Image (cartoon, rainbow, N blue to C red):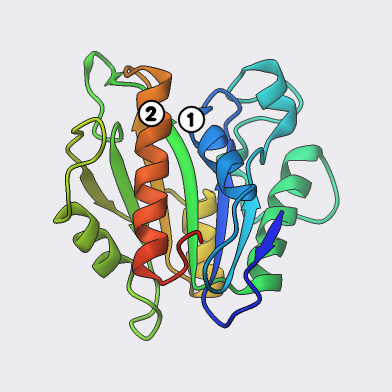
Amino acid sequence: YVRDSGRAGPTVLIVAAIHGDEVAGHHAAETLRRATPARGRWIVVPTANRAAFAAGMRATYDLPDLNRQFPGAPHGTAGPRLADALMGLVARYRPALVLDLHEALPLRDGVANELANSLIVSESRADTLSAAVLVLDLVEGPPLPGGQTLTVLAGAPAGSFNHEASARFAVPVITVESNRGEPLETRIAYHRAIVLRLLEALDGAPR
């Protein structure tokens, strides 16, 4: 969905549900695709992995973990082709910022998962908009609706959308990870609050 204000301003790409069982970002993105930015435009993909989302699963048997298949390929099996299509959005629109909405389990191997309620930041050139500065302003800003404390992590795994979009197109990427141990409405509010604050910092908030 392309939501264009008709006024000069930043282009922001918002992608959710790369993993089909991470639904809070999907619901937050759905509200945004019905809104309009005050300036610039949003490219909103609320359900990047439709098959896995419909099945309520992280991945499907014919489409293994999509977030390890970037940059993808235009031919072949479903996973690489879908990854290639999402990378094509970055190539086509050259956004000022990419927001990649995910969720994390509260525990991993029996210990607290550092990804839960975190922001993962990638940026490959100093002359682009600084995602790190945006995140710092967010962390130092007002408390989030659920009172969550954010962990900020640098860099993402090779093969992930975050890593490959940043590395190949020199655009800043922020992955937003909520905590799946919290109620769904809390997680949706968390995603919405973070995305709206980042959009406002870019002067691309909703009207």
Can you tell which quarter of the image residue 144 is in?
top left
How many numbered marks appear?
Answer: 2
Task: Point out which mark residue 192 bears.
Answer: none
- Amino acid at circle 1: Ala
Per the image, label 2 sits on a secondary structure element best described as: helix
Can you tell which quarter of the image residue 58 is in?
top right
- Identify the residue shown where x is 42% and y is 62%: 199
- Identify the residue shown where x is 41% and y is 23%: 185
Q: Residues within 10 Å of mark 2 (few under 14, many from 20)?
A: many
**Residue 3 placement, left or right of 116:** right
Q: Nearer the viewer, residue 24 or 122?
A: 24
The residue lying furthest to the bottom in this view is 127
Residue 53 position (above or below residue 91): above
Task: Point out which mark residue 24 bears.
Answer: 1
Residue 55 position (above or below residue 129): above
- Identify the residue shown where x is 35% and y is 45%: 193
Query: Can you identify the residue that label 2 sits on?
Result: 187
The residue lying furthest to the left in this view is 140
Which tag, 2 or 1, sits closer to the chain's start? 1
